[in-house]
Amino acid sequence: MLDRLTDYAECLADPDRWAIATIVEVSGSVPRPAGTSMAVRDDGRTIGSVSGGCVEGAVVDAALECLRTGEVELHSFGYADDDGISIGLMCGGDVRVLVQPLRTIPSGILSELALPGRAPRLVRELPLDDAARNGGVLTFGRRLTTEPSARTRVLLPTEAASDLDDRVRAALELGGTHVVEIADRSQPGCPVIRRLLVESTTTPARLVIYGANDFSAALAQAAALLGRHVTVCDARPVFATHARHPGAQEVVLMHPAEHLAQEMDAGRIDARTAIVVLTHDPRFDLPVLDRALRADLAYVGAMGSRMTHEKRMQELRAGGLGEEHLARLQSPIGLDVGARTPAEVAVSILAELILVETASRAGVSAASPRTLREVSGDVHDTRRTCAAEPRSPEAAMAWM
């Protein structure tokens, strides 16, 4: 639900007419991740999408029914049957969707969600009777036994969470959408007594671009579409302007090395930060790269030809950087997709950034990507996208 709070302003203002459908869990190849939500009004109007079309109609019907009954329901959508009649995901995956009338969330919580400038964290109760399913749609329409005020809780970043289970606190800090099961450890077999949907937002990951030119302008605009907080920095006032970089949240007129040192000292550069150097001038490039490569960052890339790259590596080695640090540098920057124009190069750079980040999350080394038709396994299997070599059919089955 937190993924589209800005779009849901109308819903929060008139909660009796709206239901929220939220993807709770996914498995296999699915079009949208957990946490994706859609609002449905009692007249059939919708905001957002949970599947890109596969099961949208069924989700709308479920939302309208839950508005009528007041029930909080959990729906499961699996692979559609071969006869084409069953409702399901043609991509072969499974999703579970929580459908909840907005009026079942106490008005005080809705008020907190609507506060500007906040990053709320939402904890909702899930039905426990989640049985196995055999394709199509399985609905759990039993009313939750707890009072509405106990079913949903909103947490703000400044609120202490000492009374929460450790796993709930960990899920909140991690960000995103997670299902946490609470077990009764005093009973034999430790039966699950509660299932909680934990949602929290995190600040956008930063992309800091050093060097203002046509490539930085295109990269800033493309990165903004991915939800990055983009900063462009250059020491030349004629190029470092907001007019040239409408996609950037910040355009800073400063020497790049001074800016990076300032941001690091202030704690605004972290392990989720990506740094891209586009200046083509060793006076600016080298000091930035030397410090960035010594830090724990998500991505460090530098534009330049292979000759420029080799000269740059020699200078960085001479400055004391070891091979372990130098191996973090993505240069020449970007994936080999035949990019030529600034807009195409921006796509190439961001594709490489996504690949490196995905590999880091999976705990493997990023390898040369292949087209999806060249690999086996689930389309959205992050481990597969980072695999370095084609696997045997037996190994491929192990991933599925």
Image (cartoon, rainbow, N blue to C red):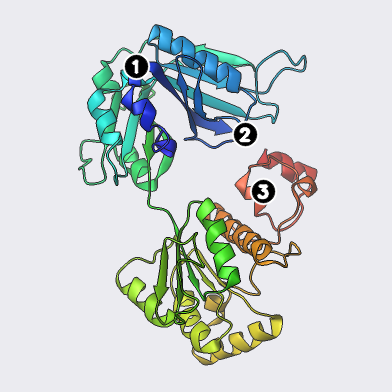
Query: Residue 229: which quarter of the image?
Result: bottom left
Q: Which element carries disc 3, helix, strand or loop?
A: helix
Q: Nearer the viewer, residue 275 or 107?
A: 107
Q: Considering only vertical position in the picture, is 386 above or below 321?
A: above
Q: Considering only vertical position in the picture, is 27 above or below 187?
A: below
Q: Nearer the viewer, residue 349 or 171?
A: 349
Residue 16 is marked as: 1
Going by the numbered disc 3, the residue's amino acid type is Arg
Residue 223 relative to residue 113: left or right: right
Query: Residue 118: which quarter of the image?
Result: top left
Task: Identify the residue at horizontal 69%, vertical 20% (top origin).
Answer: 80
Q: Earlier in the sequence, mark 1 or mark 3?
A: 1
Q: Earlier in the sequence, mark 2 or mark 3?
A: 2
Expressed as whole percent of the image width and height from the top left, the position of residue 51 reads 59, 30
Is residue 127 visible in this depiction of the protein?
no
Q: Dot 2, crowdedness within 10 Å: few (<14), some or many (≥20)? A: many
Residue 54 relative to residue 164: left or right: right
* Residue under label 3: 384
* Residue under label 2: 30
Q: Which element carries disc 1, helix, strand or loop?
A: helix
Task: Identify the residue at horizontal 48%, vertical 82% (top origin).
Answer: 290
Expressed as whole percent of the image width and height from the top left, the position of residue 125 reads 35, 24
Q: Which element carries disc 2, helix, strand or loop?
A: loop
Q: Dot 1, crowdedness within 10 Å: few (<14), some or many (≥20)? A: some
**Image quadrant in which the N terminus is located:** top left
